[in-house]
Amino acid sequence: MIIRITDAAQNHFEDLISTQKEGTQIRVFVMNPGTPAAECGVSYCSVDDIELTDTQIKFNKFLVYIDELSLPYLEGAEIDLISDKLGSQLTLKAPNARIPQISQDASLAERVEYMLISKINPQLAQHNGRVSLIDITEEGYAILQFGGACNGCSMIDITLKNGIEKELLAAVPDLKGVLDITEHQHGKHSYY
């Protein structure tokens, strides 16, 4: 199932829906999907808000609608209702909201891009840097371009070969290596 809703959360949704206009259901969505700024949300969904491209998931006493753009980012998501002495709170855990998992038969470029977005760029972001995949050569080399504080950094060669290339080769065995096409210019923006 795309999204799991615990029994406690289902009961909570049933109670909430019972106070709304007839036909109201639940919508689960991701704003800014596939980015570090991704945010998941749950809202009411009236009959007028349902799109032809929405995916409908039937639960015991209500329906959940997910828009086409959010769907791959909600794969494996879970909604739960956590109760403690202070009250109750819905939680939505969507491990793929920032980047969806890739399939086993993903292309070399898709696997490299996945690693850059999910593993490497979060590390570079600590120094206000980033790296993008420009292309994959016929020989199997990833052509990368650095941005932010990585552009002009005095440690870029070490970062490229001892960090990024090692990590990519370990995760994507059929990759031959990496090439940097960035025209590095030192400046105030560069991390030293």
Image (tube, rainbow, N blue to C red):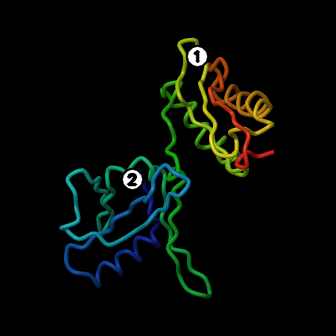
Q: Which residue corresponds to the image point at 62% horizontal and 41% vertical from the top-left?
A: 147
- Measured as percent of width and height from the top left, residue 111 is found at 55, 31
Q: Quadrant of residue 140?
A: top right
- Dot 1, how many residues are within 10 Å of its Cα: few (below 14), some (14-19), or many (20+)? some
Q: Is residue 69 above or below residue 18?
A: above
Say if 12 sits above or below 190 in the image: below
Q: Are marks 2 and 1 in contact (CB under 8 Å)?
A: no
Residue 150 x, y percent position in the rendering: 70, 41
Three-letter code, disc 2: Ser
Name the image quarter holding residue 25.
bottom left
Q: Nearer the viewer, residue 153 or 41?
A: 153
Residue on which the image places disc 2? 70
As drawn, is 57 to the left or to the right of 118? left
Secondary structure found at label 1: loop
- 9 above or below 55? below
Q: Residue at x 32, y 66 (%)?
A: 60
Q: Which mark is residue 84?
A: none
- Residue 109, image x, y percentages: 52, 27
The residue drawn where x is 80% and y is 36% is 155
- Measure how far apart labels 2 and 1 are at the Cα level: 32 Å
**Type of the residue with mark 1:** Gly
How many neighbours does mark 2 have within 10 angstroms: few (below 14), some (14-19), or many (20 or more)?
many
Which residue is nearer to you in this view: 42 or 192?
A: 192
Image position, residue 39 (x, y; %)? 49, 62
Nearer-the-camera pick, 155 or 81: 155
Residue at x-position 40% and y-position 75%: 11
**Residue at the bottom extreme, as displayed:** 86
Q: Earlier in the sequence, mark 2 or mark 1?
A: 2
Residue at the spot of label 1: 140
At mark 2, the secondary structure is loop
How many numbered callouts? Answer: 2
Of tags 2 and 1, the one toward the viewer is: 1
